[in-house]
Image: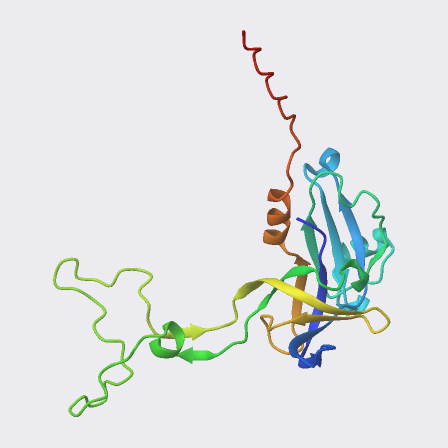
Amino acid sequence: MAIGLVGRKCGMTRIFTDAGESVPVTVVEVLPNRVTQVKSVEHDGYVAVQVTFGARRPQLLSKAAAGHFAKAKVEPGRGLIEFRLNGKDGADLKLGSELKVDLFSEGQAVDVTGVTIGKGYAGVIKRHHFAGGMASHGASLTHRTPGSIGQRQTPGRVFPGKRMSGHMGVVRRTTENLRVVGVDVPRNLLLIRGAVPGSKGGNVVVRASVKAARRAARKVVVPHKVAAPAKAAATKK
C-alpha cells in the first residue's frame, strides 16, 4: 500500500477538455498532512506512516494525545490515520514533514474512501432494490411491502441477515480506479473524475489505486534467453 492523503470533499463541478468535452469532477481540498509517527519493522513489527490532518484546539486533547503531537513537534490535528507501506517505502519521511497534493499527478488512478451519505430509515425497495408488489387492481397497500419473510413451523424463525427495511447509509465505502484530472498545488485541490463517497464537507482518504498497481506489475515481462536455432545437418551427396 502506498502513502495516501486525507482531504475534505468540497462538492462536484465540471471542467472542459481542449476538445470541448464536459468532464464531471469531485473537488477535494487536501491541506498538508503532517507526519506524526514513522513505524519500522525493528520497533513496531511492520512499516507504516502515521499522519494527522486539520487543526484542533489543544484544550480538547487528552494528555496522551497532546504528548504524542508534542513528541512529533507538529500542530494538533483532528484525527490520526495510518498508511501501511511495503518494503523501504517512506524511508525518507521524518517526523513533522508534510505531505501535499503534489504526491499525486494528473492522470493517476486513485482509490477514494469515505463514509456514505445517511439516508435514514429506508424500505426494502430503496435499500435493497426490491421490485415491489403488483401494481394491478386488487393489490391494496402491498405495492412496496417486502412480502413473506419467514417459513413454516420448521425452522419457525427468520434467518439472520434477511434483507429487510432499516437504517441506510453512513457506512465506509471505497470507490476504485478513479482518475485524477487536475492537481492545483497553490490552492491544495485535487480534481477527481466522477463521484466519491461521502457528503459535502466530509473527510475522504485518497490512495494510489491498488488494482492499477497490480495490472502494471503483471505487464512487466521478464526477459529470457532465446535458444539459438539448431544448425541443419549436412546432407550427404
Q: Position of residue 22 (x, y in %)?
A: 65, 80
Instruction: Judge by depth and name the residue closer to the eye, 66 or 134.
Output: 134
* Residue ID at (71%, 80%): 16
Judged left or right of residue 113, residue 167 is: left
Residue 36 in view in this figure: yes
- Taking the view exactly as shown, the residue that stands out farthest to the left is 153
Q: Position of residue 180 (x, y in %)?
A: 70, 66
Residue 66 in view in this figure: no
Query: Above or below — where is 227 with respect to 171?
Result: above
Judged left or right of residue 56, residue 150 is: left
Figure quadrant of residue 115: bottom right
* Residue ID at (13%, 58%): 154
Instruction: Judge by depth and name the residue closer to the eye, 115 or 207.
Output: 207
* Residue ID at (62%, 22%): 227
Q: Position of residue 125 (x, y in %)?
A: 35, 78
Q: Position of residue 47 (x, y in %)?
A: 71, 41
- Taking the view exactly as shown, the residue that stands out farthest to the bottom is 137
Figure quadrant of residue 13: bottom right
Figure quadrant of residue 87: top right
Judged left or right of residue 163, residue 53 is: right
Query: Which quadrant holds the C terminus?
Result: top right
Model colouring? rainbow
Query: Above or below — where is 169 with respect to 40?
Result: below
Instruction: Judge by depth and name the residue closer to the eye, 229 or 121.
Output: 229
- Taking the view exactly as shown, the residue that stands out farthest to the front is 237
* Residue ID at (23%, 85%): 142
